[in-house]
Image (spheres, rainbow, N blue to C red):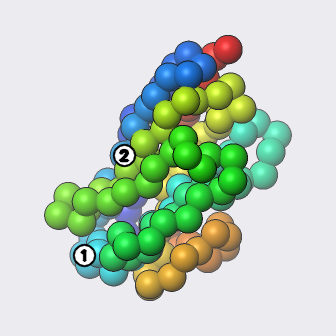
Amino acid sequence: QVQLVESGGGLVQAGGSLRLSCAASGRFFSSYSMGWFRQAPGEEREFVATIFQSGASAVYTDSVKGRFTIFRDDAKNTVYLEMNSLKPEDTAVYYCAAVLGGGIYRRSIDYDYWGQGTQVTVSS
């Protein structure tokens, strides 16, 4: 069983930056691939980024490539999402997710554990 707690969301102006954190409880964090998803009001939850269990590989949705970076610190059981050059269309609730295994997972259905979400609001 893994529990995930996100933090770091907030209100930021367009062009600004935020770093989201997702702290995981439980054992064997390094065995999990981790992902970030987001959901805007009235929209479906969408994939943002994922990182392989070893941290060796990461995949991003096209709209955030070059602006967002996902990385992990297995010693701290934490995965991060560094967000730069934020745009109003990045406004959403951001969710952290975990799946046991060594793959690159883009679909929300692939993930077994979810955090409660953290709100990110980007003003124009």
Q: Amino acid at mark 2?
A: Ser
Q: In the image, which disc is placed on residue 21?
A: 2
The Cα atoms of the two marked residues, 1 and 2, are separated by 18 Å
The reply, left or right, for residue 91 in relation to residue 79 is right
| 75 w.r.t. 53: above or below | above
- As helix, strand or loop, the secondary structure at mark 1 comes to loop
* Quadrant of the drawing holding the N terminus: bottom left
Residue that label 1 marks: 27
Q: Nearer the viewer, mark 1 or mark 2?
A: 2
Q: Amino acid at mark 1?
A: Arg
View extreme (front): residue = 66
Quarter of the figure with residue 32? bottom left
Q: Please provide percent x and percent y for residue 34.
A: 45, 66
Q: Nearer the viewer, residue 80 or 55?
A: 55
View extreme (right): residue = 42
Q: Please provide percent x and percent y for residue 3.
A: 37, 62
